Image: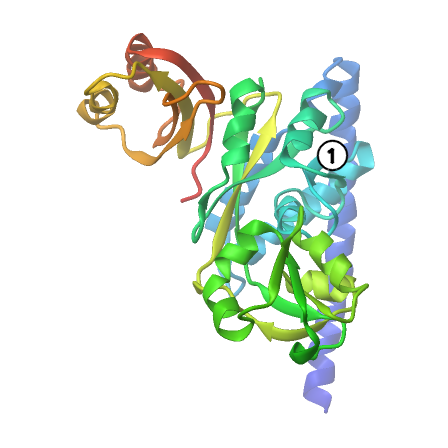
Amino acid sequence: MPKIDEIRDQIDKIDEKLLQLFNRRAKLAIQIGQEKSKQNDSNHFHVPHRERDIIERMKQANPGPLPEEAVETIFREIFSATLALEKPLNIAYLGPETTFSHQAAIKQFGHSAVFVPTGGIENIFHEVEQGHADYGVVPIENSTEGVVNLTLDCFVDSPLVICDEVKLGISLCYLSKSGDPAKVRQIYSHPQPFAQSRSWLNQHAAGIEQVTTSSTAVAAEMASKDDTAAAVAGKLAAECYDLKIIAEKIEDRAKNTTRFLVISREKAKRAKRNKTSVMFSIEDEAGSLLKVLQLFARNQINLTKIQSRPLRNRSWEYLFFVDFEGHIDDPHIDKVIRSVGKRCIFLRVLGSYPNHD
């Protein structure tokens, strides 16, 4: 097959050139790190807005056939590997390994980062607040089941800000050690995947006890130790814990997506398109919420999400979480937020960050 051999030879030569260029790029990045150290700027070794600008430029210059998503993935891994030569990023996520939070963290920061699994969302906030992690990745909402209330609660008491978001397609599998559905007597999973596959489970696993766990990875691990147990988790968990797939894509909605927030101690730099998140509480009186929302409407600020949450320890009082297009440093948005603040008991800007919608 001489034609194929000829093409493969061309690919080999390109691979060698790519390797040379990757290493050349890495050396230049190391030089930048050394210059920053001379200027006592080592605290800013990671410059996410610089990475974002490069990715956007490469997408615009991409002639194909590689899709934009592949271009972004390639450059994320280049950034991750290069940065690790100087100082790898520490990323806190809801563990253990193979959870969807873990996958979202890898998608955002590449495989060369150091991933710190935690036992709960509160622990992710704690790790970042204490400086044990550079960033945290927390789930905020699912396209099927809605908001993750615990994440909203954590923002009430935390000084951390949102600096980016990651959207991850969630595909669920029904897994067991034997692969025989007739042997299953209990099913393990996190409450969210249980809810996202409710219809499938009612049809194919009706009457089987459902046991909630702290994560899909823990569910898979427990199922791997019990011949009568199954788990609802991702395909990666099946590979990691040597489970057999009884059924794939059991989520009730084909486009099942979870949105994750990247939290940090430092604010994000302005992007070309931005989104801002705020939280506020208002007086419990007729029309108070309408008056606040009218301030956004009159100034043509597009709200992309509004969510209410009961205030802890204060019955029948609520916090409102709002996402809208634009950056807090935009003069007209800053003016509106100041006006909103005058009508609120409490107002906090959670962060302005790139809008990937």
Nearer-the-camera pick, 165 or 5? 165
* Residue 268 shows up from this direction: no
Q: Is residue 263 above or below residue 237?
A: above
Q: Position of residue 197 (x, y in %)?
A: 50, 62
Q: Image quadrant for the N terminus? A: bottom right
Q: Indicate left or right for 275 with 112 as reference.
A: left
Q: Can you identify the residue that label 1 sits on?
A: 89
Nearer-the-camera pick, 104 or 41? 104
Q: Indicate left or right for 27 with 4 as reference.
A: right
Residue in view at x 64 percent, y 27 percent: 125
Q: Is residue 279 above or below residue 274?
A: above
The answer to which quarter of the image holds residue 255 is: bottom left
| Circle 1 crowding by C-alpha within 10 Å: few under 14, some 14–19, many from 20 | many
Residue in view at x 44 percent, y 18 percent: 314
Q: Indicate left or right for 130 with 85 as reference.
A: left
Please name the colour scheme applied to the rendered image.
rainbow
